[in-house]
């Protein structure tokens, strides 16, 4: 019983890595621009498919992840410049509606380009098993955890140690005030979208060997990411990270000890309870104080 419990917790931690990375991207964009991008899940989907094709071409898992990050980062810059920047002066509901349209365009475009047949691949790490005491853990999952923690650490160093990171933190407090002291809002918006999309690409690339890839996989991903963001505290990166891991572990334990059929339901049940009990989230919002 204890062995199964520990393994379920570890598997949930791996799921939480993906949830946290996707949700951090949502949080960064919202914290800087107050824009809710419902197409963020499709960016994760693009990252997963890019990783699939990159691995097929190179046979390198590292190249697959790097390819996913590069493509999604560039895509984030593109949609910020073409779609969201022109909508900045308008009411935020216009950006939300535009993101819904973009989500539909991307998912249907993926259906047209990639087809409706699910795709999957494995790496040599998939079959390697690490044993620590009585617990077995796939090497693939260990790499995902290590890479996720390294990415989060690098993000924290970027925000704390670089001028651009400090500018992003300041913009999350007051974007208009930043513009008065010479910080260009358009540049920060582009960086926020690129950074958020790149994190979704990291998640897509890292997790792609574990899941079947489909054109509509982004929908459930963004729904769970929003649950993570709300439970963690909208606009709060630290809370988002904690909530990502907590929801991933809760989902895994529910699937392992209750029923896999209710696995997705558990995440949204926790969301409802969080809204009823602590609507401000685990940690009150604000990007600048919590990264």
Image (cartoon, rainbow, N blue to C red):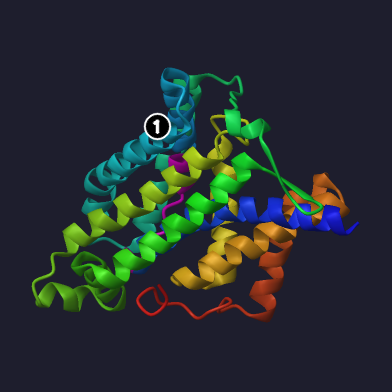
- Residue 100 visible (yes or no): no
Number of other residues with Cα within 10 Å of mark 1, as a class: few under 14, some 14 to 19, many 20 or more: some
Find disc 1 in the rendering and name its residue: 63
Magenta span contains residue 244: no
Q: Is residue 77 visible?
A: yes
| Horizontal and vertical percent position of residue 10 | 70, 54
Q: At which x and y percent is residue 148?
A: 50, 53
Taking the view exactly as shown, the residue that stands out farthest to the right is 1
Question: Which residue is at the far left?
Answer: 182
Q: Position of residue 107 (x, y in %)?
A: 48, 33
Quadrant in the rendering for residue 261 = top right
Q: Secondary structure at mark 1?
A: helix
Please give the name of the residue rendered at 73% of the width and 61% of the height, measured from the top-left corner.
Answer: 250
* Position of residue 134 in the picture relative to residue 156 (left or right): right
On-image quarter of the C terminus? bottom left
The number of numbered badges drawn on the structure is: 1
Q: Which residues are magenta?
A: 32-44
Asked if residue 242 lies left or right of residue 291, the reply is right
Q: Residue at x 26, y 41 (%)?
A: 78
Q: Is residue 92 above or below residue 182?
A: above
Q: Residue at x 80, y 50 (%)?
A: 255
Asked whether 171 or 153 is in front, the reply is: 153
Near-viewer residue (104 or 269): 269
Q: Quadrant of the N terminus?
A: bottom right
Q: Among all residues in the image, which is located at the extreme front?
A: 133
For image coordinates 56% across by 54% down, the residue present is: 17
**Quadrant of res 72:** top left
41 inside magenta stretch: yes
Q: Position of residue 158 (x, y in %)?
A: 30, 64
């Amino acid at each position: 019983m204890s062995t199964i419990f520990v393994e379920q917790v570890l598997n949930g931690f791996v799921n939480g890595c993906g949830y946290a990375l996707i949700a951090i991207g949502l949080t960064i964009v919202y914290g800087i621009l107050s824009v809710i991008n419902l197409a963020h899940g499709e960016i994760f989907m693009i990252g997963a498919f890019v990783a699939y094709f990159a691995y097929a071409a190179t046979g390198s898992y590292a190249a697959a992840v790097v390819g996913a990050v590069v493509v999604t980062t560039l895509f984030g810059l593109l949609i910020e410049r073409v779609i969201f920047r022109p909508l900045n002066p308008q009411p935020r509901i216009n950006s939300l509606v535009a993101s819904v349209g973009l989500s539909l365009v991307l998912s249907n475009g993926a259906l047209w380009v990639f087809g409706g047949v699910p795709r999957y691949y494995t790496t040599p790490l998939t079959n390697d098993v690490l044993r620590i005491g009585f617990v077995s853990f796939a090497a693939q999952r260990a790499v995902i955890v290590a890479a996720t923690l390294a990415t989060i650490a690098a993000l924290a160093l970027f925000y704390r140690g670089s001028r651009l990171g400090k500018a992003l933190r300041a913009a999350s407090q007051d974007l208009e005030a930043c513009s008065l002291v010479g910080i260009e809002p358009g540049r920060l918006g582009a960086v926020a979208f690129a950074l958020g999309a790149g994190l979704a690409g990291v998640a897509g690339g890292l997790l792609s060997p574990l899941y079947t890839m489909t054109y509509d996989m982004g929908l459930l991903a963004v729904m769970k990411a929003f649950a993570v963001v709300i439970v963690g505290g909208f606009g709060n990166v630290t809370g988002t990270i904690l909530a990502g891991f907590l929801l991933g572990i809760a989902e895994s334990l529910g699937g392992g000890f209750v029923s896999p059929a209710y696995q997705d339901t558990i995440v949204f049940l926790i969301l409802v309870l969080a809204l009823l009990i602590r609507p401000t989230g685990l940690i009150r919002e604000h990007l600048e104080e919590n990264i």
